[in-house]
Image: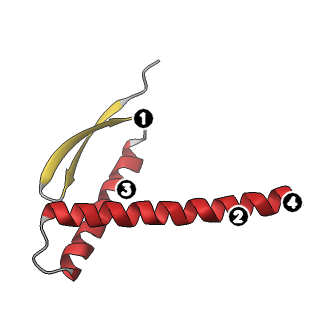
């Protein structure tokens, strides 16, 4: 069964139609966080292009994801040692 849904989001100054299985509430929350982070980067770096801000945001997101994965791996290791 195909549970994919369409979700319209305005990210930065562009409109996107995203397709996925997440709830509308989840997609709305992700869109808000993404726009907040983009605005924070643009506020910290003067005259940054939208593309460069998006690349920095992606870099930060992947860095955070890697940190969380390392934390999870450590927790799993501790649990399996007990």
The mark lying in front, picked from 2 and 3, is: 2
Label 1, label 2: how far apart the Cα atoms are: 30 Å
Instruction: Give the mark nearest the N terminus, 1 or 2.
Output: 1
Instruction: Give the mark nearest the N terminus, 3 or 1.
Output: 1
Q: Residue at x 30, y 55 (%)?
A: 31
The mark lying in front, picked from 1 and 4, is: 4
Packing grade of label 4 (10 A; few <14, some 14-19, many >=20) is few
Q: Residue at x 67, y 59 (%)?
A: 73
The mark lying in front, picked from 1 and 2, is: 2
Lateral position of residue 33 relative to residue 74, left or right: left
Instruction: Give the mark nearest the N terminus, 4 or 2.
Output: 2
The secondary element bearing badge 3 is classed as: helix
Packing grade of label 3 (10 A; few <14, some 14-19, many >=20) is few
Q: Which residue is mark 4?
A: 81
Packing grade of label 1 (10 A; few <14, some 14-19, many >=20) is few
Q: Which residue is mark 3?
A: 29
Q: Which residue is mark 1?
A: 21
Marking on residue 74: 2
């Amino acid at each position: 069964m195909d549970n994919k849904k369409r979700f319209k989001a305005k990210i930065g100054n562009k409109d996107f139609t995203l397709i996925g299985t997440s709830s509308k509430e989840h997609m709305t929350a992700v869109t808000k966080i993404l726009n907040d982070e983009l605005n924070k980067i643009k506020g910290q770096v003067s005259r940054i292009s939208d593309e460069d801000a998006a690349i920095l945001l992606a870099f930060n997101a992947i860095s955070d994801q890697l940190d969380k994965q390392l934390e999870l791996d450590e927790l799993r290791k501790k649990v399996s040692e007990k």
